[in-house]
Amino acid sequence: MAEKRRFDLERASRHDARFRSGKPVEIKSTMHEHADGQPGDWKVYREYHEKLRRHNGWYCFVVYQSHGQSGCTVLKDKMVRQVTYRSFDGMGEEITVEPSKQKYRSMWSSKTIV
């Protein structure tokens, strides 16, 4: 993914990589479907999200399919720069519990992390 999207992997408290221009990138990955049949989701923590936004960072969202111990296949990936952080429970009512979750199937039609 780093080669495809042209960023360098870097481990820091608020991001996983940087574009060569210096902009930080947070990589979020999820399985296409969990063992129980539920779609994958990403967890976004408010503190790191706010730091990334302050530094004009990007998210790289990745959906993969696991092949057990033999690895995985990336099914989709999407770079998103501007996102809005909102916390919701499963019924769509606002709550203050961390982290915020985003089901990947709705992510591709939205720039909002819920």
Image (cartoon, rainbow, N blue to C red):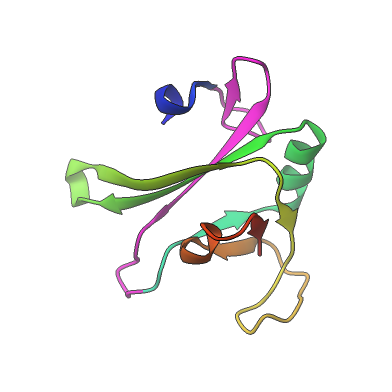
Question: Considering only vertical position in the picture, is 4 above or below 49?
Answer: above
Q: Quadrant of the C terminus?
A: bottom right
Q: Is residue 32 magenta?
A: yes
Q: Position of residue 80 (x, y in %)?
A: 61, 43
Q: Quick check: 22 above or below 2?
A: above
**Is 47 above or below relative to 104?**
above
- Which region of the structure is painted magenta? 9-37
Image quarter where the N terminus lies is top left
Residue 104 placement (x, y as % from top left): 48, 60
Instruction: Answer with left or right where residue 37 lies relative to residue 68.
Output: right
Q: Quadrant of residue 33?
A: bottom left
Q: Residue at x 72, y 46 (%)?
A: 49
Image side of residue 95 versus residue 113, left or right? right
Q: Nearer the viewer, residue 5 or 43?
A: 5
Left or right relative to 22: residue 6? left
Q: Residue at x 60, y 80 (%)?
A: 90
* Residue 19 in magenta stretch: yes
Q: Residue at x 67, y 80 (%)?
A: 92
User: On the image, which quarter does residue 19 sit in?
Assistant: top right
Give coordinates of residue 63: x percent, y percent.
40, 51
Q: Position of residue 99 (x, y in %)?
A: 66, 61
